[in-house]
């Protein structure tokens, strides 16, 4: 874990973690390693480049054009202007902007890569990124326009532009002119040195930042979907022996075993309700550890891919200041992030599908073991005109279908671009964006499922089919927390506000799950 000093993440010391990036996204400050060894490493790379330029060495993207234009020699008098042109001609991003947190995460991931000390950038540039983070100035970065190799060129051009005082930034909830904000805060733009435009833009920082944020949401969602499954199992009067420890000992996937263990803990009660008529519950309950477990078991592998990318130098060329070499390669290629995000979004969409099937059972009087149709809380003469969660179940189906539709792997849609120089590309940024969309849709399904499961448990209580001691302490606490904001649905009412509030709480990880 990276050292934290006075709530500050230190860059250029130990490896950063996904949690460090999330901390920066959520407002933590940044500090550069203050050791002489770090300063010397940064200075050796930039000093070597300066000497090489004086000796008229040939360096891709410094004394040559970019990409397919690498055969174009840049006259010495224009070398200093080249990085500025790189930032400007890539200013063609479209689509929605990254939000403030996402943009701060991009600052963190780019700073981490450049702080590896092999990109040939100056200490001044690193300090400028730290300044943006610590003043909470986030570049305005459009989401669309990267194929994920040669890195996130177009979106990262917006970061580069912010460092030199151009384009716009997100500041105090508004889109503002960068120059205006700099003047207001008495900040000075930097001038990019010959390799620094390429160092800033030629890398995987955007896809990696989004992957970090997706990972943390997926990690929480695995736990939340387990808790929902526990609630649904009680509401359906399901069989807790489906999660028996001896049963799962014979199929030793550790993540799957963890999910089963959490379910067992949730279902521990003095007098657990059971359905004596049904020996085996339907798959969406019985196989929940296997579905959620596939996500849980993928998380360590996905973390490894993301954190290795995060702590890599991923631009081109690499500047080996220690041995005074310029190493031309393809570290900007985002294939590992693409694979991680294509895998993660599939695992998450399966969670949406699992909850969708659980909700289909829970609300259908033909399958829900005696609960009222659509979980309506109405009684007596008004019952026929009330429809409870009928429309919510339709919404769950719609959100699930859209989540499943987004699971087509982005990484297989490589296409040749830039005069066939970039003839095989990763699509890593698109995969990360897809994953975030699948997460959003699945969180919508989860929010509806939480409310429906809470309604089901309350219906069992009101019908004297469930007593407090038949809920474990964990489930009692969960239901009580939800009911502070969610009023039992007796008469039909619009539930959008309840769903949005529940979504916000999921994003905030308001409910503590499992230790």
Image (cartoon, rainbow, N blue to C red):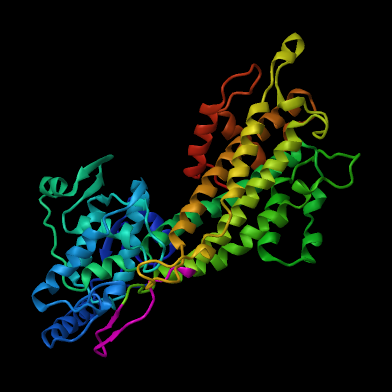
Which image quarter: residue 56? Answer: bottom left
Residue 508, position as x, y percentages in the image: 47, 43
Q: Quadrant of the C terminus?
A: bottom right
Drawn side of residue 81 relative to residue 15, left or right: left
Rendered position, 343 above or below 15? above
- Residue 319 on the magenta span: yes
Residue 49: x, y in percent?
Answer: 18, 81
Residue 87 percent coordinates (x, y): 23, 61
- For the view shown, which residue lies furthest in the front direction? 419
State left or right for residue 126 relative to residue 15.
left
Q: Main secondary structure of the magenta part?
A: loop
Is residue 415 found inside the magenta-colored segment of the image?
no
Please identify the residue farthest to the right as the structure is shown. 277
- 472 left or right of 128 in image: right
Vertical order, 97 against 72 (above or below) = above
Residue at x-position 49% and y-position 58%: 431
Horizontal and vertical percent for residue 318?
30, 80
Identify which residue, 325 or 18, lies in the foreground: 325
Please give the name of the residue rendered at 12% of the width and 54% of the height, measured from the top-left corner: 187
Q: Residue at x 54, y 53 (%)?
A: 218
Q: Is residue 210 above or below residue 328?
A: above
Q: Quadrant of the N terminus?
A: bottom left
Front residue (pair 94, 512): 94
- In this rendering, is residue 236 above or below 219? above
Q: Answer whether residue 514 is visible to the viewer in this image.
A: no
Q: Quadrant of residue 454?
A: top right
Q: Which residues are magenta?
A: 317-335
């Amino acid at each position: 874990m990276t050292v934290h000093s006075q709530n500050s993440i230190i860059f250029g010391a130990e490896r950063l973690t996904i949690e460090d990036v999330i901390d920066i996204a959520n407002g933590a400050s940044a500090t550069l390693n203050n050791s002489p060894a770090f300063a010397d490493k940064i200075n050796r790379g930039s000093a070597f480049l300066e000497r090489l330029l004086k000796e008229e060495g040939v360096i891709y993207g410094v004394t040559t054009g970019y990409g397919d234009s690498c055969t174009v020699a840049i006259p010495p008098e224009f070398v200093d202007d080249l990085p500025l042109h790189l930032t400007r001609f890539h200013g063609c991003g479209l689509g929605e902007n990254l939000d403030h947190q996402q943009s701060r995460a991009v600052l963190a991931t780019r700073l981490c890569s450049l702080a590896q000390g092999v990109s040939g950038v100056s200490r001044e540039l690193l300090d400028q990124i730290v300044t943006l983070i610590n003043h909470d100035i986030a570049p305005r970065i459009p989401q669309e326009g990267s194929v994920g190799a040669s890195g996130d060129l177009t979106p990262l051009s917006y970061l580069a532009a912010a460092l030199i005082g151009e384009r716009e930034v997100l500041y105090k909830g508004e889109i503002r002119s960068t120059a205006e904000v700099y003047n207001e805060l008495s900040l000075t733009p930097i001038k990019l040195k010959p390799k620094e435009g390429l160092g800033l833009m030629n890398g995987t920082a955007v896809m990696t930042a989004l992957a970090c944020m997706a990972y943390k949401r997926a990690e929480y969602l695995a736990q939340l979907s387990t808790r929902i499954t526990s609630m649904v199992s009680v509401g359906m009067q399901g069989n807790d022996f489906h999660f028996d420890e001896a049963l799962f000992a014979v199929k030793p996937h550790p993540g799957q075993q963890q999910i089963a263990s959490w379910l067992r803990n949730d279902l521990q009660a003095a007098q657990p309700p059971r359905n004596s008529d049904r020996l085996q519950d339907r798959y969406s309950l019985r196989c929940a550890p296997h579905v959620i477990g596939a996500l849980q078991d993928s998380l360590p592998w996905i973390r490894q891919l993301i954190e290795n990318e995060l702590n890599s130098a991923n631009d081109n060329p690499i500047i080996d200041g220690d041995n005074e070499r310029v190493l031309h390669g393809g570290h900007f290629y985002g294939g590992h992030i693409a694979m991680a995000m294509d895998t993660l979004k599939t695992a998450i969409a399966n969670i949406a599908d699992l909850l969708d099937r659980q909700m289909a059972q829970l609300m259908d009087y033909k399958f829900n073991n005696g609960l009222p149709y659509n979980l309506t809380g109405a009684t007596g003469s008004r019952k026929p005109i009330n429809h409870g969660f009928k429309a919510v179940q339709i919404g769950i189906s719609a959100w699930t279908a859209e989540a499943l539709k987004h699971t087509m792997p982005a990484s297989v849609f490589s296409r040749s671009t830039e005069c066939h120089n970039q003839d095989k590309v990763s699509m890593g940024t698109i995969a990360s964006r897809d994953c975030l969309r699948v997460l959003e849709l699945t969180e919508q399904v989860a929010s509806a499922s939480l409310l429906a499961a809470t309604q089901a448990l309350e219906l069992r209580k009101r019908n004297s089919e469930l007593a407090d001691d038949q809920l474990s302490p964990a489930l009692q606490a969960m239901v009580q927390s939800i009911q502070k904001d969610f009023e039992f649905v007796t008469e039909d009412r619009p539930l959008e506000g309840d769903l949005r509030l529940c979504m916000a709480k999921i994003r905030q990880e308001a409910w503590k799950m499992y230790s």
